[in-house]
Structure formats: structure tokens, C-alpha cells
Image (tube, rainbow, N blue to C red):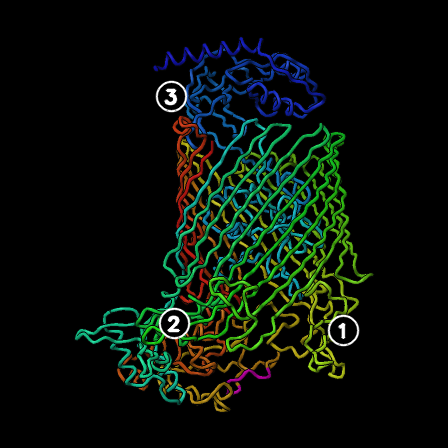
């Protein structure tokens, strides 16, 4: 169809629509409602949309409507306002009537197209000459035509998008096509806070917000992983890649070292405590992180270390039902996975460690030659290889009695146990279907989600299946009453082999041990393969059901009362079966290798109930004094019940149930079943209030009071008052700032002070004397039976009370260049007082342990910085970048339990996580170099650390100049040659988010990391050999870079070449070279490409033809690249102080999927 025909049809359609409005029937009856509500209701019933410039129409004024025709309804809605309107298509265009008419004179015709950032035309956008009534709206193709005055300004706007203005002089050719960007104006952003919402511009506490766009389509198991690096000051730590492990969450550094407290924030999902790790990420609409006491104090004792508020998606009010389906197909591979040494290197290394210490070799010369021959031969079959002359070699030789030899004594195989146990790739998938719709009276949201995640185990199955279901309904029962109900169900099924040791390297075998014998059976004498493959299964099923019922009562405008009733049921069942293990002889006949078999069943059930009742009132005085008052009550109770049962003697290996066990060991002897259990409960109650005041959006004040009580302390210490206060100054709203307003749109200074209480203790009855009761476990007989027993209760402190958190925060927020450049900076101090810790020791005559008391204080100082840029270019190219950086340091300010100031524990006045160690001068490359070093230490050399110092050993620096190397008494002030050489606290955490979109294409890159962190792992996981001997020498390939000279056994015998420039010292079965020291202190700083995502959204003009509203396909990658100087066997994310590199590996994940709406 040519343009003229199309224009004529369009004009005719507009004319018919303008005429039809006067006769279109519509029934609208509303009494004393805001204009915006009346507009929304009319749009729902008639399909007509109101188009107007912000400020031209007062949408908050109250109107009453009683009309049966569209014309009358519009007139009554706009009654009393100085506006006129006209019908253009399905749009009711509203304009001010007092605007000046365009000045007569020379005009030029301007034509163009208005589109959104995805390239789709915007229908009904307002195109108007500023300050006049000369305007039009865009047609179905987003096109417009307007005669513009010579000196006029063209304004283009649409609801939900940022308006743009162009002077006539800027429009050179008479053609102007514009791309409108969604309005994300910071000044109007609404943020979810405790028990309500606030405009971001009026916030005075420390709050960070994450929207769903930053979480979408990430190939992660849970939402916690997607938050890593996104929020300044929020630290997400993954200790393991195990499918059932949950990341730990911490806000603003070390929160507490008190007994019984993890220091984690409170997680609330739609106002109810929940688990962020089991929540369906596709249900999330936004996340608010409350970081200081002023922001989180409204939640009292449950939120001493911050709050994460998750708001999930709800139903729509547009009257149309919308279906959304998302999927993700994922392929994952382990990252930073190490490997076993080859068998020749391993045998050489073990022998070198033995002979370096003055012992004999473990692998004989004859056996070493067999190892070399086996390694050089070609694979032939299970556990066998064949030489060029046709000789078959067996990884485990056969004995004359028909059994296989012991692998430690005779094995010559060459197995990489990491490759044997772990897969190279594993497959996972996720599917999500949601339905939402409704109107002003009733709306709903329903979603179903399935995640099937495969594990990396190669010899046995491991995996996680998660099922989520959510149903939300909101009903406007009356004009003054609204009811909301949410039901969420989560089930997680976790599977792993019982024989999988949590300490990964401990489960690895020596490379000379065979995976299979020559007949293809798993070999175990004692390699780990048999135990993992056939040692039984561990399954865990966790169900959580959440019910949330809420009522909103608004008898008069702006006075709202909320009643929330929340109930959760958790049921967790764990099944463990340990199967009897069978080896096979040379002829393939089975025989018992491990006689033990048992079944263990356990169940944990929790019932949690919470009620929140609060009422708030908002009002203004003279339109400049804006006030908000809220008071409320909160109570919660948790009941927990646990039992476990273990019984020996599985009767049928294929049916490992408790009722099918004998209660006997392999030899027929009775084994007493292990039965245990407990019941626990705790309760809290609290009264709270909030007062907000702002003067003309310039000067802001907020006060919160929380009066909390807990069942964990005794009467007299159960209740405590926790206040908080905050101030804010919107400098950009001041008149004197007006000259800069075109450049700096937002500038706000804020500060806060507050206190919070922490009720967490080691157990829930810390202040009550308890006795452990035993069943028939007495050590004497009474009437032929063992009696029940009860232990003598220990001492308790009746004065045990709240741990108190005191917080100071100051912040500056800014927005420049129409808020395209935004940012903030915050500095804070947090004092954690009266933490629960061990009291100083008393004389043994006391006869029992000293009870814990409130005796420890901690101070944390830190800062946060964030900056972001968003822009839209004229060609529709949209791009942006966000960067955040934060740091925190913690110091012990009171700790009476270390009167000697030993450096092996906390010291008053010292920083948390200090690493004390020696300064390494270097690795002696020759005996002469070591001799020269020892001669410089005339008063004892390095004798305090060991003897027989030679080439390949560490030379330690004499820091205190006393002519010897020692640690002194190990007390502050007398540490000899030891000093603080590092700190394991992660410092300077950062995140960098880069994104862009153009004509339907989008790309996002997210980097995350830590700029400073020290890590010490001085065991066999780093050095290989240590004082525990060869049985804990793991033989990983990374430790092969050890010192070897011409005097080393393996070099002299020709199995290795000399390596005098090695990274590691010579291997020894003692710890003299493994002292904590600067030479092997690891730099654990890193940067990781956490996510890369590329997507394409098909044009609506294409997908609409097949009934689809939106369709996007994408490709995504997680943990794609890591930059770090950390040695390979450690992952910078999974390390912690003193340990690391020993857990289930993290994964690099590639995924693809689609998002479709219809």
C-alpha cells in the first residue's frame, strides 16, 4: 500500500473515531477518587488512552464520575481543570487551554518517526510545539507531520518515556526521527523499604536497589549468586561448588565474632522471612538492600546486620491475561580444576620426600622402572596397557593366591583421579512459565519453575532438582479494603554418592592405584573409586510451603492499616545408605572388602508463624510540610523438631530401607541402633514506630523506634529499646542551586545513627541450665539392664543479654546531565558491642567450664562508592556502565579472654584476620648459600624451626636482629622474627557492569572481583608433603615444581631433571619449610568475567503475526574468565582463612534460551 492510500485510510479512521466518541457507550461510576484512578478505569473499559504532558493535568485531585457515554465520562474526569482535549485515534490528547498560540510567521514542515530503543514504533506519542497548542500524535507506524514555527521548539513525549526537545534550528532537513528511552528518572524512583516504600530522592538511610533486569537469564542456581558484585558492600561468598551448598551473605565486612551468630542479613520475601537460595529467580521484581541501622532498624532484633528485601512479581491491572515462558539450557565445566601428577613424577616426589628427610625410598628402583614402562605403553583394556612387543602390563599385578596385589605396595598404574572422578561437562536446564492479569478489582500472578542441575561426578550420580510454584492474588473487596494472598511452594531434591568426601583432595587416590582391575571391576585397595561408585547414595528432600495473607484497610485517604499473617512449613528428609563393598579376585569372583552397611534416616520439621500489624498516615501542611507516621506490632515464633535413626545390616542392597535392616553387623553380632532427636523453639515480639518529615522535599528527617523482646534471655534482660535517626538535605532543590540545575539534577547529603540488637546465641536456651539425657547408656547394671543417665548441668550466666550494634553512616548522592551520570559515596562506622564470648579461665577448682558472657566488642569502618552512566544516542543506540567499589576493615576493641595477648587468637586493639608469619629471604639454591645464611645467625640459626638445613630449604629473615630465627613467646611484644605479613579479609570488592542495545540486539558484560586479599594455605594442599606424612601427600600436578638438584634421589636415578629454580622448596615430611611466611603468602586478588550475555529481540511486527507479543533469544556465559596470581589449585572465590582448594569445584557455564510473551 502506497503512502497516500495509507494516509487517507488513517485520516478516515481518525475521523470515524472522533465521531464515534460522542455515541460510544461506557458505564463509569466512581465516587471521590483521584483523577489517575478514574483515567485507568476508563482506559480499561473503553480502550482509550489519555495522552498529556506531565504538569498539564493534576492527576491527584479528587473527582466523581457518573456517566454512560465516553464523552460525558471524559468531561467529568477533566472537570475543573484548565485543559481541553481531542480524540486522535484511540488517544485522548489533553492540552492546557491557556497556552499561547503559535506566533504567525514562517513555518516549516517537520516529519519523522518516533521509536523505542528496540526499534519498535511508538503509537500515540505526543508531538507538540512547546508553549502552544500546535501538536499531533504519531500514527500506527510511529510517524508524524507538524508545521513548526521558525523559532519554535519541538517537544516529543510519551507516557513512561523521557521527553525530548529540539529547536527548529536543529532540524536542518525537515526530517527528525527520534528514539525515546524509558523514563528511569532517579528523582521519581520508588524504593521498597521496611514496611513500605519511599521515593529514592527522599531516602536518608543507606539503601541499594537491584531490578530484575540485572538478574535475568543468568545461568545460576540461585539468586544469591546473581547478586555477587552487584551491590556495593554486599559480599557473597561461595565456599564450594557443591550443588547443595548455599553462598554466605554478608553486608559491610565482618559483622560479629559472637558465638552463635553468622552475621548474615535478614532476607524477607514480600515481607516474610525466606530463603533467597531456593527462591525462583524469575519471580523477582526488585531487591532492596538495607545496609545501615537507620534503614533496617524497623525490623529490630532479626536484622542487626542489614536486610535484603525481595519484592516478587504481581498481577497486572490492564485487563489482559499475559503468558510468559522462559527457558535456559546449560552446559557446565569445572574451573581451576587441578590434576594428579603422572605416576613417574609421583613416585619420584614421594621418594625425594623420604630421602630428603634421611629415610629410605618407598618406591623401589624396580617398581619405578615398571611405572615408567607402564606409562610409556599403550592403553589396552581396563587397568592394563600393552608394550610394543605385545607384553600386557597390569596396573595392579595379580598375586599367586588369585587376588590382586595391594595398590600402595605394588601399583604401577597411571590414573589422573580428578579426570576419573569428575566429568568434563555436565548438562542442566531450567524452565519457567508464568501467567498474570486482572483489573483494578482483582489481579493474579501464577508461576511454575523447574531447575534440573547435573553434577560433575563421573563414577556415580549427583544432581539437584528444584521445583517452584507461586500463586498470588489481590482483590479489592471494597473501596476501603484490599485482600492479598500468596502461596509459594519449593521442593529441592539433592543426590550425591555417600562415599564422596567433602574434603575433595582427601578423596583422591595415588596415581599408581588403578581405577579398574583387569576384568573391568572397580578396584579398591584402597582407591576411592569403589566407595564412590558402589558405596551407596545420600538423598535429601527439602519442602518449604509459604502462606501469606494480608489485608489493607484504608477508611480515609492516606490512612492505611496493614494486617499480615505469614506461615511457613519446612520439612526436610535425609536418607543415607552405606552399602557393603565387594572387591573381585583375578577370576572375577566377588569377596567382601568393606563389611559395614547401614541405613540412616533423619527428619527436620519447622513451623514458623509471623504476624505484622501496622498503621500509617501520610499528610501535608500547606503543601510544603510533608509528614508520615507509622506504628506497629510484630511477633514471630519458630518450632523445630528433629530426629535421626541409624540401623546396621542392609538386607537387600537394592532396597535400602530402615525396616529392611537386621540390626546386626556382618558377623551376626547385634549393633545398637543410633537414635537421637530434639525439640527447639524461640519467639520474639516487637513494637515499632516511624516518623518521617520533609520540608518541600529539601530537608528530610526520619526517626525509627523498635522495642524488642526475645525468649532467649531471662526475665529482666528480654526487652530492649533500639532507636535510629537520619537526616537528609536535597541541596539540588535549593533556590541558590538553580543556576546549576541544568547540569546537576540531584545532589543530596544524608547521615544516620542507629542501634540494633542481636539475639542470636550458640543455642536457643543459652541462659537456662539443661541436662543431656541418655537412654540405657549407664556404665553400670541395675537389675540386669543399663540405666538411663542425665549429665550435671553446667554453669550459665543469668545476665546474658543482647549484643548491640551501633551504626553511623554519612552519604552523598548525585545525578548529573539529566541524571545520565549518577553515583553515591558512603562512609560508615559500626560498633558491635557486648558480643557473646568465652569468659577468662578460672581455677580448675571451679569443677566446670566458665559460662559465656557479653564481653567482646568489635569496630568496623568502611566506605562504598558507586557510579553509573546511561545514555541514548540519536540512532537508537543505548548504552551504559555501572561501577561499584567498597572496602571495610574490622578491629577488636575489647577481648578479655586473651590476657597474655597471644597472637594465635583475637587481640584487643588488633585488626581481624591478621596473618602473622616470617619474612622469607629466599630459597637456598645451593648448600653454600644455606651455610652462609646460617653463619649470619650465630645465636642458634634456624634450629627453633628444624634441623638439617640444606639447599632447597627456606632462609628466614632475622627481623629482631638477635642472631636466630624464632617466634619468641608468641605474645604481642615478643613475637621474635614474626610480624603481620598480610590479612585474609577481602578488601576493595568491586563490580563492573557494561551493557548496550541497538535495534533489538543487546549485550551485557559483568565483571566482579576483589582487589586485595592475602591467603595462606601451608599444608599439603599447597606444598604437597607435610608433617602428616606420605598418606596425606596428595600428589597434585601443581606441586611438581619443587626443588631438585644433582643430589636429589630422582635426579641421580634419572627419573627427573634438576630444578634448582623451582617455586616450591624440597619436599619433606616435616613443617620446617611450611612455616607461615611471605615467600608463599598468596595474593588472592582477582577479577572474573562473571557473566556475558548476548540477546536479540525480534521485531513486534514480525512476532505479532503468530500471536506473540515479545520474543527474545539469548546466549549467556558464567565465570568465563578469571585473572589472578593465585596458584592454580585454589579458586579465589572458594578460599577462606587457612583452607581452600579442597572442595567441590565451581563451574564455567554456557547457556542459551528464549523469553517469549503472548
Lower position in the chain sequence, tag 3 or tag 1: 3
848 in relation to 117, above or below: below
Q: Nearer the viewer, residue 97 or 302?
A: 302
Query: Would you place residue 759 above or below residue 376 in this image?
Result: above
* Whole-percent x, y for residue 755 in the image: 72, 55
In this view, the mark in front (3 or 1): 1
The residue beneath circle 2 is 1036
The kind of secondary structure element at disc 3 is loop
Say left or right for 531 vs 729.
left
Give the CA distance from mark 1 to mark 2: 48 Å
Tell me if 406 is positioned left or right of 761 in this view.
left
Q: Are marks 1 and 2 in contact (CB under 8 Å)?
A: no
Q: Which residues are magenta?
A: 962-969
* Cα gap from disc 3 to disc 1, whole angstroms: 89 Å
Which residue in the structure is indicated by mark 1? 795
Does the segment drawn in magenta span residue 687? no
Would you identify the image quadrant in which residue 249 lies? bottom right
**Which percent across, then down, holds residue 526?**
41, 76
| Label drawn at residue 173 | 3
Residue for point 65% across, 17% down: 28
Q: Secondary structure at mark 2?
A: loop
Total count of labels: 3
Upstream in the sequence, badge 1 or badge 2? 1
Query: Considering only vertical position in the picture, is 325 above or below 772?
Result: above
Q: Residue 385, how many percent across, how many down?
A: 25, 72
Disc 2 crowd, CA 10 A, few/some/many (<14, 14-19, 20+): many
Gap in Å between the C-alphas at discs 3 and 2? 71 Å
Amino acid at each position: 500500500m502506497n503512502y497516500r492510500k495509507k494516509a487517507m485510510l488513517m485520516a478516515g479512521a481518525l475521523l470515524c473515531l472522533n465521531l464515534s466518541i460522542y455515541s460510544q457507550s461506557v458505564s463509569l461510576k466512581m465516587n471521590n477518587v483521584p483523577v489517575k484512578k478514574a483515567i485507568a478505569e476508563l482506559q480499561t473499559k473503553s480502550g482509550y488512552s489519555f495522552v498529556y504532558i506531565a504538569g498539564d493535568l493534576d492527576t491527584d485531585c479528587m473527582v466523581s464520575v457518573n456517566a454512560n457515554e465516553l464523552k460525558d465520562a471524559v468531561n467529568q474526569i477533566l472537570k475543573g481543570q484548565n485543559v481541553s482535549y481531542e480524540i486522535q485515534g484511540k488517544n485522548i490528547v489533553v492540552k492546557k487551554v491557556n497556552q499561547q498560540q503559535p506566533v504567525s510567521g514562517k513555518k516549516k514542515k517537520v516529519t519523522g518517526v518516533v521509536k523505542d530503543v528496540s526499534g519498535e514504533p511508538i503509537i500515540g506519542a505526543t508531538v507538540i510545539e512547546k508553549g502552544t497548542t500546535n501538536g499531533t500524535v504519531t500514527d500506527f507506524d510511529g510517524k508524524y507531520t507538524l508545521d513548526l514555527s521558525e523559532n519554535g521548539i519541538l517537544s516529543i513525549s510519551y507516557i513512561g518515556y523521557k521527553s525530548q526537545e529540539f529547536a527548529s534550528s536543529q532540524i536542518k532537513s525537515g526530517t527528525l526521527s527520534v528514539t525515546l528511552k524509558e523514563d528511569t528518572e532517579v528523582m521519581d524512583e520508588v524504593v521498597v523499604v521496611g514496611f513500605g516504600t519511599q521515593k529514592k530522592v527522599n531516602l536518608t538511610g543507606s539503601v541499594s536497589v537491584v531490578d530484575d533486569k540485572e538478574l535475568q537469564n543468568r545461568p545460576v542456581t540461585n539468586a544469591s549468586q546473581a547478586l555477587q558484585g552487584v551491590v556495593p558492600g554486599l559480599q557473597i561468598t561461595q565456599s564450594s561448588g557443591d550443588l547443595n551448598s548455599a553462598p554466605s551473605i554478608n553486608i559491610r565486612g565482618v559483622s560479629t565474632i559472637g558465638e552463635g551468630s553468622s552475621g548474615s542479613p535478614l532476607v524477607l520475601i514480600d515481607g516474610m522471612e525466606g530463603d533467597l537460595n531456593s527462591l525462583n529467580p524469575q519471580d523477582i521484581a526488585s531487591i532492596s538492600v538495607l545496609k545501615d541501622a537507620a534503614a533496617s532498624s524497623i525490623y529490630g532484633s532479626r536484622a542487626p546486620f542489614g536486610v535484603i528485601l525481595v519484592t516478587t512479581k504481581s498481577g497486572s491491572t490492564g485487563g489482559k491475561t499475559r503468558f510468559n515462558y522462559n527457558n535456559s539450557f546449560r552446559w557446565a565445566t569445572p574451573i581451576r580444576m587441578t590434576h594428579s601428577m603422572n605416576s613417574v613424577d609421583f613416585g619420584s616426589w614421594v621418594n625425594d620426600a623420604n630421602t630428603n628427610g634421611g629415610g629410605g625410598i618407598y618406591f623401589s628402583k624396580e617398581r619405578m622402572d615398571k611405572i615408567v614402562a607402564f606409562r610409556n605403553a599403550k592403553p589396552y583394556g581396563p587397568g592394563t596397557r600393552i608394550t610394543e612387543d605385545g607384553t600386557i602390563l597390569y596396573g595392579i599385578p595379580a598375586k599367586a593366591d588369585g587376588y590382586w596385589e595391594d595398590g600402595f605396595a605394588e601399583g604401577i598404574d597411571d590414573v589422573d583421579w580428578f579426570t576419573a572422578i569428575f566429568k568434563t561437562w555436565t548438562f542442566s536446564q531450567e524452565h519457567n512459565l508464568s501467567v498474570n492479569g486482572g483489573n483494578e478489582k482483582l489481579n493474579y500472578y501464577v508461576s511454575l519453575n523447574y531447575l534440573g542441575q547435573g553434577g560433575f561426578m563421573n563414577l556415580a550420580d549427583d544432581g539437584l532438582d528444584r521445583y517452584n510454584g507461586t500463586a498470588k492474588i489481590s482483590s479489592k473487596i471494597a473501596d476501603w479494603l484490599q485482600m492479598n494472598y500468596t502461596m509459594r511452594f519449593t521442593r529441592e531434591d539433592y543426590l550425591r554418592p555417600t562415599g564422596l568426601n567433602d574434603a575433595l583432595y582427601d578423596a583422591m587416590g595415588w596415581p599408581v592405584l588403578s581405577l579398574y582391575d583387569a576384568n573391568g571391576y572397580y578396584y579398591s585397595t584402597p582407591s576411592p573409586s569403589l566407595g564412590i561408585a558402589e558405596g551407596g547414595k545420600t538423598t535429601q528432600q527439602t519442602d518449604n510451603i509459604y502462606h501469606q495473607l494480608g489485608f489493607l484497610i484504608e477508611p480515609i485517604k492516606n490512612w492505611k492499616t496493614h494486617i499480615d499473617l505469614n506461615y511457613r512449613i519446612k520439612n526436610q528428609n535425609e536418607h543415607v545408605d552405606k552399602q557393603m563393598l565387594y572387591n573381585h579376585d583375578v577370576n572375577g569372583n566377588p569377596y567382601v572388602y568393606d563389611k559395614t552397611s547401614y541405613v540412616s534416616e533423619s527428619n527436620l520439621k519447622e513451623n514458623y508463624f509471623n504476624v505484622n500489624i501496622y498503621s500509617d498516615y501520610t499528610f501535608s501542611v500547606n503543601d510544603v510540610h510533608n509528614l508520615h507516621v507509622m506504628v506497629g506490632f510484630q511477633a514471630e515464633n519458630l518450632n523445630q523438631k528433629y530426629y535421626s535413626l541409624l540401623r546396621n545390616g542392609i538386607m537387600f542392597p537394592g532396597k535400602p530401607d530402615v525396616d529392611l535392616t537386621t540390626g546386626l553387623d556382618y558377623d551376626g553380632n547385634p549393633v545398637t541402633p543410633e537414635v537421637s532427636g530434639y525439640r527447639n523453639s524461640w519467639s520474639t515480639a516487637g513494637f515499632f514506630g516511624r516518623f518521617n518529615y520533609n520540608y518541600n522535599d529539601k530537608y528530610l528527617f526520619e526517626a525509627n523506634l523498635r522495642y524488642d523482646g526475645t525468649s532467649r534471655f531471662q526475665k529482666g534482660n528480654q526487652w530492649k529499646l533500639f532507636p535510629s535517626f537520619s537526616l537528609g538535605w536535597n541541596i539540588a532543590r535549593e533556590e541558590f542551586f538553580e543556576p546549576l540545575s541544568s547540569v546537576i539534577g540531584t545532589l543530596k547529603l544524608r547521615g544516620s545513627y542507629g542501634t540494633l540488637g542481636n539475639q542470636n546465641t550458640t543455642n536457643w536456651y543459652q541462659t537456662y541450665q539443661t541436662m543431656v539425657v541418655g537412654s540405657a547408656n549407664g556404665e553400670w547394671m541395675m537389675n540386669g539392664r543399663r540405666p538411663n543417665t542425665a549429665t550435671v548441668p553446667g554453669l550459665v550466666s543469668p545476665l546474658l543479654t543482647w549484643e548491640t550494634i551501633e551504626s553511623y553512616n554519612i552519604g552523598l548522592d548525585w545525578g548529573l546531565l539529566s541524571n545520565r551520570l549518577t553515583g553515591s559515596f558512603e562512609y560508615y562506622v559500626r560498633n558491635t558491642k557486648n558480643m557473646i564470648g568465652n569468659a577468662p579461665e578460672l581455677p580448675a577448682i571451679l569443677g566446670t567450664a566458665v559460662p559465656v558472657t557479653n564481653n567482646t566488642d568489635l569496630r568496623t569502618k568502611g566506605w562504598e562508592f558507586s557510579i553509573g552512566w546511561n545514555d541514548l544516542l540519536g540512532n537508537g543506540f543505548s548504552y551504559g556502565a555501572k561501577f561499584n567499589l567498597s572496602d571495610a576493615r574490622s578491629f577488636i576493641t575489647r577481648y578479655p579472654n586473651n590476657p597474655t595477648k597471644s597472637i594465635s587468637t583475637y587481640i584487643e586493639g588488633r585488626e581481624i584476620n591478621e596473618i602473622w608469619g616470617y619474612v622469607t629471604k629466599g630459597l637456598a639454591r645451593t648448600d653454600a648459600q644455606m651455610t652462609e645464611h646460617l653463619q649470619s645467625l650465630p645465636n642458634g640459626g634456624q634450629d627453633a624451626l628444624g634441623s638439617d638445613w640444606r639447599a632447597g630449604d627456606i632462609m628466614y629473615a632475622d627481623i629482631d636482629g638477635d642472631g636466630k630465627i624464632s617466634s619468641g613467646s608468641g605474645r604481642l611484644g615478643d613475637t621474635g622474627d614474626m610480624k603481620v605479613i598480610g590479612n585474609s579479609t577481602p578488601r576493595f570488592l568491586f563490580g563492573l557492569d557494561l551493557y548496550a542495545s541497538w535495534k533489538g540486539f543487546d549485550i551485557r558484560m559483568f565483571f566482579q572481583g576483589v582487589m586485595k586479599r592475602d591467603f595462606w594455605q601451608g599444608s599439603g594442599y599447597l606444598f604437597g608433603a607435610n608433617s602428616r606424612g606420605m598418606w596425606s601427600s596428595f600428589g597434585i600436578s601443581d606441586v611438581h615444581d619443587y626443588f631438585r638438584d644433582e643430589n636429589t634421589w630422582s635426579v641421580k636415578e634419572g627419573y627427573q631433571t634438576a630444578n634448582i629454580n623451582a617455586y616450591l622448596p624440597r619436599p619433606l615430611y616435616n613443617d620446617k619449610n611450611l612455616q607461615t611466611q611471605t615467600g608463599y603468602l598468596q595474593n588472592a586478588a582477582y577479577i572474573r568475567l562473571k557473566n556475558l550475555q548476548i540477546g536479540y529481540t525480534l521485531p513486534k511486527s514480525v512476532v505479532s503475526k503468530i500471536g506473540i507479543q515479545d520474543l527474545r533469544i539469548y546466549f549467556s556465559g558464567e565465570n568465563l574468565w578469571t585473572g589472578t596470581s593465585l596458584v592454580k589449585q585454589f579458586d579465589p572465590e572458594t578460599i577462606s582463612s587457612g583452607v581452600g582448594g579442597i572442595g567441590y569445584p565451581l563451574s564455567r557455564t554456557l547457556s542459551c534460551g528464549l523469553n517469549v510473551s503472548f
